[in-house]
Image (tube, rainbow, N blue to C red):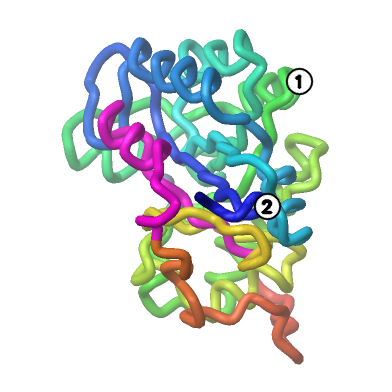
């Protein structure tokens, strides 16, 4: 048996809920709805703020699941957002601002020959009215594992927060790293994230969140691969879950001293 106050929180990430051109970062509408119905019958579905609160508190009396969606695909207006809204399930929606601003499709879709429409600013504003929370997913969906200048980091992190706050009127507190594996994350980027006023960053390499361990970094599990994988993660046996976070000691999450960024360039 698990310690009574030590239940994990799971943060799932999806990208695009659709009925056509499904790929590794899409899920069919019916499957997505099955996921939501299966989870909501069994586990408390909560916001990232609720998960963070119990991380900070150091106790959690029941398991929790939060839903996140990355990138900012326009089709989510038709399927994902209505499905979540109908069920009154909280959602954090992470967007890369360059694509919202320009309407350009994501390079990873163009290279597969399926350019897909990104969200518009108006759609994000409508999501906010429906209770969705918006988060930052960089400006150009950049890989932070490669060397970036201070100006690039400011453009991909600091300016994105300001822009999303202007668009939505929300405080933008969460930053989800594109690609999200350990090799796509840098200490330099994390320092700028906290210096820019974000409360928390999210990775995407699998892993669960144990209360008391970490409140500035939430680990996420990929929801797209399907029901079997999802059940495997969520019907956990506490004895089998490795309690140490995957990223333990890999990155420093406290705000570093003297990390103020030079204020010069802006995004192009
Ligand atoms: Zn992404």
Quadrant location of the C terminus in the rendered image: bottom right
| Number of residues whose C-alpha sits closer than 10 Å to that of mark 1, classed few (under 14), some (14–19) or many (20 or more) | few
Residue 239 among those drawn in magenta: yes
Element marked by disc 1: helix
Check whether the beta carbons of the residues at disc 1 and disc 2 lie within 8 A of each other.
no
Q: Is residue 60 left or right of residue 28?
A: right
In this view, the residue farthest toward the front is: 1
Q: Is residue 94 left or right of residue 46?
A: left
At 45% from the left edge and 72% from the top edge, which residue is drawn? 247
Identify residue for label 1.
129
Residue 184 spot, x, y in % from top left: 38, 67
- For the record, the magenta segment spans 216-241
At 57% from the left edge and 18% from the top edge, which residue is drawn? 84
Element marked by disc 2: loop
Disc 2 residue lies near ligand 1 with CB under 8 A: no
At 72% from the left edge and 79% from the top edge, which residue is drawn? 255
Q: Nearer the viewer, residue 245 or 7?
A: 7
Q: CA distance from mark 1 to mark 2?
A: 35 Å
Residue 77 among those drawn in magenta: no
Identify residue for label 2.
5
Instruction: State whether residue 3 is above or below residue 262.
Output: above
Q: Nearer the viewer, mark 1 or mark 2?
A: 2
Mark number displayed over residue 209:
none
At 34% from the left edge and 71% from the top edge, which residue is drawn? 183
């Amino acid at each position: 048996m698990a310690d009574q106050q030590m239940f994990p929180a799971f943060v799932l990430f999806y990208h695009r809920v659709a009925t056509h051109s499904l790929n590794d970062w899409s899920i069919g509408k019916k499957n997505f709805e099955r996921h939501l119905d299966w989870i909501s019958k069994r586990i408390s579905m909560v916001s990232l703020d609720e998960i963070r609160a119990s991380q900070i508190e150091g106790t959690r009396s029941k398991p929790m699941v939060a839903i996140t969606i990355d990138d900012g695909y326009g089709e989510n207006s038709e399927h994902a957002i209505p499905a979540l809204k109908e069920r009154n399930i909280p959602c954090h929606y992470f967007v890369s601002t360059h694509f919202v601003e320009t309407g350009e499709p994501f390079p990873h879709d163009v290279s597969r020959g399926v350019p897909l429409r990104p969200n518009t600013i108006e759609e994000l504003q409508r999501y906010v009215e429906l209770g969705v929370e918006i988060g930052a997913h960089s400006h150009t969906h950049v890989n932070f594992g490669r060397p970036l200048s201070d100006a690039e980091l400011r453009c991909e992190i600091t300016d994105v927060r300001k822009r999303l706050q202007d668009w939505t009127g929300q405080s933008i507190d969460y930053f989800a790293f594109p690609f999200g594996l350990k090799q796509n994350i840098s200490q330099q980027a994390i320092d700028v994230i906290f210096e820019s006023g974000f409360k928390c960053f999210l990775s995407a390499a699998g892993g669960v969140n144990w209360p008391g361990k970490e409140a500035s970094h939430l680990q996420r599990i990929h929801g797209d691969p399907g029901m079997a994988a999802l059940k495997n993660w969520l019907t956990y046996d506490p004895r089998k879950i490795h309690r140490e976070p995957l990223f333990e000691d890999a990155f420093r999450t406290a705000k570093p001293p003297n990390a103020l960024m030079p204020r010069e360039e802006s995004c192009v």
